[in-house]
């Protein structure tokens, strides 16, 4: 397994992983990911990837990838705040293909991403649905602490879930 930063040539793997999440939601209704109303077109995803690439180049968003035999199997991004007052905070998002979960890929991605931003982001925050115990354990292992909970903040197929907000202080840059 190789952990590395995003490259411009990663679009195909990026799009394949992102689109696979739409397929997974049908079989895993408790998947704690937010979805837009419809699956984006390839062109829309290319535009989104372009925006991510721009933020990577501007040091506004580190993106770490997990790659096995040339296939992208996981992504971890930290979205830096967009206002003068919150640029010291990054919001974490992790996605790993279902068949690759439970193999330490999330840990590798988190380690790579956190090391990649510790000189310019002071705090990383995230939200996770409360029933995602595997994710909660992973984030706890990396020092994230619960700092809030919003009851019924996530609704899928008529079922409500609490959302747990977690934070990790990296220290001043």
Image (cartoon, rainbow, N blue to C red):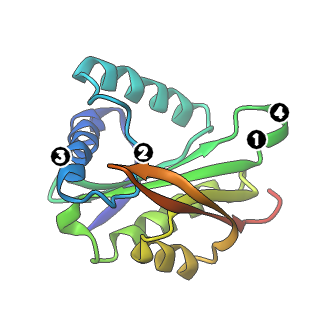
- Disc number lying in front (1 or 2): 2
| Disc 3 to disc 1: CB gap under 8 Å | no
- Tell me the CA gap for discs 1 and 2: 23 Å
Residue 102 occupies quadrant: bottom left
Task: Give the vertical position of 92 relative to 54 (above or below).
Answer: below
Q: Mark 3 points at which residue?
A: 23
Q: How crowded is mark 2: few (under 14 residues within 10 Å), some or many (20 or more)?
A: few
Q: Locate residue 76, reporting x and y percent.
A: 44, 54
Q: Which of marks 4 and 2 is in front?
A: 2
Residue at the (83%, 60%) spot, across then down: 172
Tag 1 residue: 87
Q: Which of marks 3 and 1 is in front?
A: 3
Q: Distance between the residues labelled 3 and 2?
A: 13 Å
User: What separation in Å lies between label 1 and label 4 (alpha carbons)?
Assistant: 6 Å
SS for tag 3?
Answer: helix
Pick whichever of labels 3 and 1 is earlier in the sequence: 3
Which label sits on residue 132?
none
């Amino acid at each position: 397994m190789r952990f590395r930063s995003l490259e411009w040539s990663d679009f195909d793997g990026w799009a394949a992983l992102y689109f696979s999440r739409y397929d997974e939601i049908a079989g895993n209704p408790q998947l704690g990911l937010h979805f837009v109303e419809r699956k984006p077109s390839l062109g829309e995803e290319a535009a989104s990837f372009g925006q991510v690439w721009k933020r990577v180049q501007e040091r506004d968003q580190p993106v770490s990838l997990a790659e096995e035999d040339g296939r992208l199997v996981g992504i971890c991004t930290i979205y830096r705040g967009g206002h003068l007052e919150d640029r010291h905070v990054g919001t974490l998002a992790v996605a790993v293909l279902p068949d690759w979960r439970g193999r330490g890929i999330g840990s590798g991605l988190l380690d790579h991403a956190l090391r990649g931003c510790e000189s310019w982001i002071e705090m990383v925050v995230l939200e996770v649905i409360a029933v995602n115990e595997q994710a909660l354990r992973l984030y706890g292992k990396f020092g994230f602490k619960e700092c809030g909970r919003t009851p019924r903040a996530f609704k899928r197929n008529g079922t409500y879930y609490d959302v747990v907000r977690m934070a990790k202080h990296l220290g001043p840059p």
